[in-house]
Image: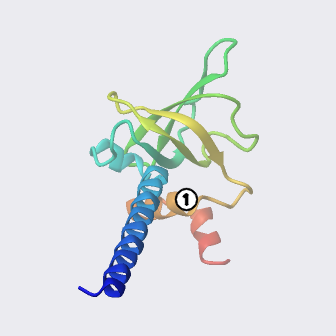
Amino acid sequence: MNPIRKKRLYIVLAILAGVGIAVALALSALQQNINLFYTPTQIAQGEAPLDTRIRAGGMVAKDSLKRTGDSLDVEFVVTDFANSVTIRYRGILPDLFREGQGIVALGKLNAEGELIADEVLAKHDENYMPPEVTKALKDSGNLPSAQSKYEAGE
């Protein structure tokens, strides 16, 4: 083989190897940062993975908020009106967090089916609900009437 062609072949192989390594690293980083959204019904049906960071959302059930003494530990139930999931969180809840409102929690599902959250996100005005929660409630047929009016642009 001609020495010039041999040199070009090595250069092309090195470039392909570099691109392959870069793509593999990018895909690995993306896979670790994906937070898929699950409804309480999907969690109850076992569709959500254990010990993997996920997002779960729905409406905070009435009279479900429990605070633990002097600590920042809280526990509450999120529902899509078909099923419910218990969420445990240590920290300060957002100012707009209330029972009967839509939230999204980020955390890991444990073996008991409880979400151990490290972040809780609440709505930002009285009519807003996270899109994932709206879709989940609409799919279950339990979208509150005020929200459906807001969706329709009324």
The residue tagged 1 is 144
Residue drawn at (50%, 49%) of the image: 57
Which of the image's four quarters has the C terminus? bottom right
**Quadrant of res 63:** top right
The residue positioned farthest toward the top in the image shown? 69
Q: Front-most of 114 and 146?
A: 114
Residue drawn at (62%, 63%) of the image: 146
**Quadrant of res 140:** bottom left
Residue drawn at (60%, 64%) of the image: 147
Q: Amino acid at mark 1?
A: Pro
**Quadrant of res 51:** top left
Q: Front-most of 13 and 102?
A: 13
Percent of width and height locating residue 3: 32, 83
Examine the rendered structure and indicate whether residue 71 appears above or below residue 48.
above
Q: Front-most of 114 and 59?
A: 114
Viewed as shown, does residue 87 lie left or right of 140? right
Viewed as shown, does residue 104 lie left or right of 28? right
* Coloring scheme used: rainbow
Label 1 crowd bin: few (<14), some (14–19), many (20+), radius 10 Å: few
Examine the rendered structure and indicate whether residue 74 appears above or below residue 108.
above
Which of the image's four quarters has the N terminus? bottom left
Tag 1 secondary structure: loop
Q: Front-most of 95 and 47?
A: 47
Viewed as shown, does residue 136 lie left or right of 48? right
Percent of width and height locating residue 21: 40, 62
Examine the rendered structure and indicate whether residue 47 appears above or below residue 142.
above
